[in-house]
Amino acid sequence: MTRVGVVGMNYWGPNLARNFARLNDCELAWCCDLDEELLERHRGAHPTTAFTQRFEDLLADDALDAIVIATSVPTHAALARASLEAGKHTFVEKPLALTGDDARGLAALADERDRVLMVDHLLVYHPAVQAMKNLISDGALGDVFYLYGNRLNLGIVRPDENALWSLGPHDISVMLWLVGEEPLEVSATGESYLQPGVEDVVFGRIRFPSGVSGHLHLSWLDPHKMRRMTVIGSEKMVVFDDMETERKITVYDKGPIPHTETYGEYIQVRSGDIHIPKIEGTEPLRIVCQEFVDAVREGRRPAADGHAGAMVVRVLEAMSESLANAGAPVRIGEGA
Ligand SMILES: NC(=O)c1ccc[n+]([C@@H]2O[C@H](COP(=O)([O-])OP(=O)(O)OC[C@H]3O[C@@H](n4cnc5c(N)ncnc54)[C@H](O)[C@@H]3O)[C@@H](O)[C@H]2O)c1
């Protein structure tokens, strides 16, 4: 039985508490928030869990194996550091930290203390994204040319976080995982229509060493609600649409036919079947929580570990630098 405590019980934390509480091999031992009223709201759902306003109570509980941090982003680094230093396995909401240095420091600390550090890169564990990863690694898509993500909504406008930091971690973590390379260079442009200095629309680009490029369109000022990732390969193309309930993934047997004859002949396109594989409907957050508990029990590093989390933060940081410099590319890979 892994004993877990959740810190931060406002909007997202209760979802984590619910999922950890439902796992067979896990006990939700603590719920913590600075706000007593919030705690009161959730006591009924977890009658055997201890509730506290003091994070220190979790650190001091020797029988507590792991701490789950679902507080506001600026507090992640300090709370995660305290948790790891207290010898707790640590799960942190995305993004891991606000700076690449803090994020890398946390990943190194977890290694040093031999503790599991996992970041909630939820979509990496989505069964549809796993299916996309398999299509890429099996070679079914052929050579990957490029991929792009659209995360758009006329949604909650956050005063303290731009669209890049709020929405970007999802698509960036998926792109890094699907491509399986460390990025070489990134760039981003964006506009602040609603609040000065807080971009509500961002277009980003990641260049990978193999030549693959990833493109992002992130916005909370758009008529469409879109959660989509498209991968274009030389043999097939695949679309993951998280707004769909039954057609999460659509695989298009479409591609260019390489011309082998005379120079100047136009390239023809091949257009074959469109396939919709069945995707398991398990809640991705449940899979993520189970993966954390399994990684703690087995003493192994999950795919979304501290190092993966730190690379996502590095990309966000470099894209912010590019945003501030009218889209100038920022090199982050070898030779930076
Ligand atoms: N993975 C996802 O899809 C997803 C979705 C939404 C939010 N999130 C992430 O979840 C996290 C929380 O988001 P939110 O919208 O619930 O944030 P929020 O700011 O609304 O709530 C944070 C809560 O943490 C509490 N808190 C802050 N510092 C604390 C401390 N030292 N000790 C105890 N409690 C403390 C606050 O009182 C507040 O209730 C963020 O990192 C966000 O990025 C992830």
Image (cartoon, rainbow, N blue to C red):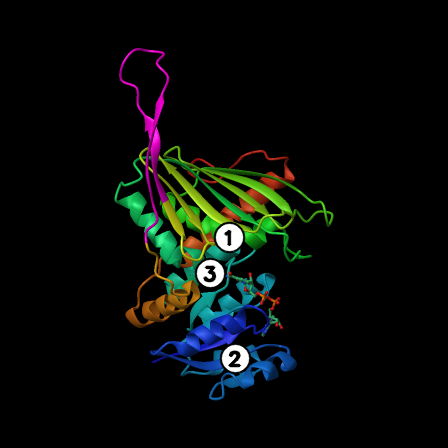
Q: Earlier in the sequence, mark 1 or mark 2?
A: 2
Dot in front, 3 or 2: 2
Residue 90, which numbered label?
Answer: none
- Residue of label 1: 169
Q: Is residue 122 left or right of residue 270?
A: right
Q: What is the three-letter code of the residue carrying label 3? A: Leu
Q: Earlier in the sequence, mark 3 or mark 2?
A: 2
Q: Is 249 in front, or is 56?
A: 249
| Amino acid carrying mark 2 in the image | Cys
Position of residue 116 measured from the top left corner of the image (x, y, whole percent):
38, 66
User: How far from the left and from the top, in percent, is residue 88?
Assistant: 42, 73
| Residue drawn 46% across the image and 61% down it | 120
Q: Which residue is mark 3?
A: 106
Q: CA distance from mark 3 to mark 2?
A: 23 Å
Q: How far from the left and from the top, in percent, is residue 43?
A: 55, 85
**Is residue 266 inside the magenta stretch?**
yes
Of marks 1 and 3, which one's residue comes earlier in the chain?
A: 3
Q: CA distance from mark 1 to mark 2?
A: 25 Å
Reading the image, the residue beneath label 2 is 31
SS label for mark 3: helix
Identify the magenta region: 251-277
Q: Residue at x 63, y 82 (%)?
A: 36
Q: Nearer the viewer, residue 100 or 72?
A: 72
Q: Is residue 86 visible?
A: no
Dot 1, crowdedness within 10 Å: few (<14), some or many (≥20)?
many
Amino acid beneath label 1:
Pro
